[in-house]
Image: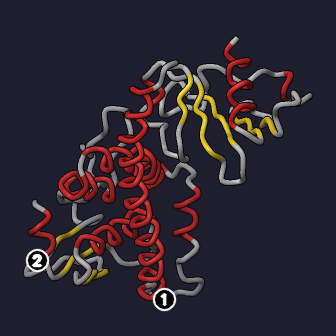
Amino acid sequence: MKVEEVKKIRKALTHGGKFHSDDVFGAAFLKVINPDIEIVRSNIITDDFDGLVFDIGMGYFDHHMKDNEVRSNGIPYASFGKLWREFARELYGDYVYESIDRRLIQDLDLSDNTGSYNALALAIDVFNPLENTDGDKEFFEAVEFAKAILERMILKQKHRLEDIEKVKKYYYEAVDKRIIILDEPLFYKDYLPSTDAIYVIYPSNRGGYAAQGVTKTSDTNELKKDFPKEWVSKLPPYLRFCHSSRFLIAADNFDDIMHAVREALK
């Protein structure tokens, strides 16, 4: 199914009763694509229903069947993940599609399929009614909450893609590829891990300059090289801060932060 088809669909149906992050975020995503689509909640799919069906009915956008699809990393798809896979790449391109699937959707899909703990799924669950009602009012409140998160995340990932293109330029222009100097704070974590970069320097939004260690991969917090352990217990005179986890330092001026980074490389 193409995005243009979804934009013309008048109704989408999901199950009634208690709701979860899967049907809520699935509905939210459909609302992002087509703000005019009507989300119907019912446990019965009538023969004459001609809209999109998700998270019920054992169809294309359901995931309750025995032979449900699984990602290459072993995480099974839920309905939100299937909707995202079907439409997001066409809407937003590879980077936004893949990064949001990795950072948001996979954990939600895993939680819905296995019951594993997920803080965002728990946040959606608290919207369920406290009394024995159909929950429609609360469901649509949860959908608005999820839609705000999803729209913001899409916007942020688009911005990050722009940042990455800028970071590439800084990297290629760097004299010492181990130390990347940015003129502004930019998102670099999906690019620099695969390069020779070890530390990144940038103007701090708290004044002065900061430097961070580059991680070994974009999906880990393990650094290529920590800042020295002794800086945590006793700051050198050219620094004003060293994080206890040794991934971040700050100084009052550029010369001091550059000196610190060069010392850390020794």
Residue most toward the right? 234
Quick one: 125 or 104, which is closer to the camera? 104
| Residue 179 locus on image (x, y percent) | 56, 24
Label tally: 2
User: What residue sits right under mark 1 in the picture?
Assistant: 133
Disc assigned to residue 165: none
Three-letter amino acid code of the residue under disc 1: Thr
In contact (CB < 8 Å): disc 2 and disc 1: no
6 above or below 74? below
Residue most toward the top? 266
Q: Residue at x 35, y 54 (%)?
A: 158
| Residue 54 locus on image (x, y percent) | 25, 66
Label 1, secondary structure: give it. loop
Cα–Cα gap, marks 2 and 1: 32 Å
From the viewer's perspective, tell me whether residue 217 is left or right of residue 60: right
Three-letter amino acid code of the residue under disc 2: Lys
58 above or below 73? below
User: What residue sits right under mark 2 in the picture?
Assistant: 8
Query: Which is more N-terminal, label 1 or label 2?
Result: 2
Label 2, secondary structure: give it. helix
